Image (cartoon, rainbow, N blue to C red):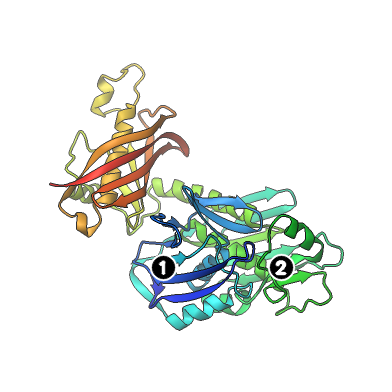
Amino acid sequence: MIRPQRTLRTAVEFSGRGLHSGENVHVRVLPAPQGTGVEFVRSDLDDAPPIPAHIRHHSTMDRRTRLVRGSVEVDTVEHLLAVCHGLEVDNLRVELSGREMPGLDGSAKTMVDLFHQAGITDQRAEARVFRLDQPLYVRDGDATLVALPAENPGLTLQYIASFTDPEVEGGSFQLDVTPESFARDIAPARTFCLASEVDLLREAGLGKGATRENTVVLGDPQTVLRMPEEPVRHKLLDLLGDLQLLGADLHAHVIATRSGHHTNAELVRRLLDLMEEKETGGLIKHESGMDVREVMRMLPHRYPFLLIDRVIEVEGYQRAVAIKNVSINEPFFQGHFPDQPLMPGVLQLEAMAQLAGVLLLRKLENTGKLAVLWSIDKVKLRSAVQPGDQLRIEVETVRMKGQMGQVKGTGTVSGSKVCEAVLTFTLIDS
């Protein structure tokens, strides 16, 4: 079930108080080019890097989803991400004037209305899809999440609630997620808390922006629900937003029992591990990938010093992933400990540098330039790379300004980190 990537036709803006911080924040949601993904930018901070909405930038927090990049963070992004997932919007730039997204009416309905008013438009590239083919299970105390292969293409979510407060009944809700069902059945559901939790939340410094209008207080006789099973539907809203951090449409049946943001994130991490395992095995091919011939058109390196076999994924100008199949026929093995052959650490770093060159030189203004390595910092060589290994190399742009670029690189073998470094480049005319 393949669909095109999508973005908004025009920008939308809204303002409001953060549910937890109580601070007033203004937000602009802008269209973004295909392959960008959803990225958050703190407009109140000078030179703040974009924070991609991806599990790699997730930071565990109580009652909300936080994304962090370096010293910059954004809070309570799950409602906007749920809208992106539910309405199938892939590429956006979200500029906000503070740390926490506004809570608005406690649901995602306002943002759904704004997205519909702005219009959603198709882009040329295909959306990334991951179809689960084996069960995954997450448990944390009484909270469980089970992801099962789906009988049909698409995502089905089911939530089973069980509250500890004796005055509050549980409930369950199941949904086949489509843009229509999301907007109708999930988006209007408001956030909630138990009446017995209100004082504890205030003592913890949370809920400063919560009101009776934007927060359902369960166990309070004055509470009036907007729709049947509203708290359970909101749990599905949060789950859908956290699943957006996978960076791909998930085709699966997910059953949650008392799950929250912590267990949601753990499931996404396990899904990502499985997805990356299939990618490096060649079972998933991305439109953004590049074969070795395309790599050679961008880089001056040739055998035996071209250390990238295939670029399997590129996300805008922010991130790239490549693989190097390490063979005993590599010329360096003839002299580097022949009885116990090891891939030299400097060549692992060189593979990172070559992939970083691919990422930096993709920008149109860098056409015809060379990425010259300036410095290598924070190097760690953690484990041996041997013949028969598949080295998975990942680089992410930390800073790009003028003719200077800095990336963070990591290398893994079978899911275990073997090397990492921060590389700084200058771009010169070739």
Q: Residue at x 48, y 55 (%)?
A: 54
Q: Please, what secondary structure does the residue beneath circle 2 have? A: strand
Would you call the spot at circle 1 few (<14 residues within 10 Å), some (14-19), or many (20 or more)? Answer: few
Q: Is residue 119 left or right of residue 134?
A: left
Question: Can residue 393 be seen here?
Answer: no
Q: Where residue 329 sits: x, y (%)?
A: 26, 28
Q: Which label sits on residue 182?
A: none
Q: Residue furthest left?
A: 430
Question: Disc 2 or 1, which lies upstream in sequence?
Answer: 1
Q: Is residue 116 left or right of residue 158?
A: left
Q: Which of 246 and 375 is in front in this view?
A: 375
For residue 65, which quarter of the picture? Answer: bottom right
Labelled pair 2, 1 in contact (Cβ < 8 Å)? no
Q: Residue furthest right?
A: 166
Q: Which label sits on residue 2?
A: 1
Please name the amino acid that badge 2 sits on.
Answer: Phe
Q: Is residue 296 left or right of residue 352?
A: left
Q: Which residue is drawn at 25% across and 25% down?
A: 332
Q: Name the residue under label 2.
A: 192
Above or below, 258 against 12 in this view is above
Q: Which residue is drawn at 73% across and 48% down?
A: 141
For residue 306, which quarter of the picture? Answer: top left
Q: Nearer the viewer, residue 209 or 343?
A: 209
Would you call the spot at circle 2 few (<14 residues within 10 Å), some (14-19), or many (20 or more)? Answer: many
Q: Nearer the viewer, residue 116 or 292?
A: 116
Please name the amino acid that badge 1 sits on.
Answer: Ile
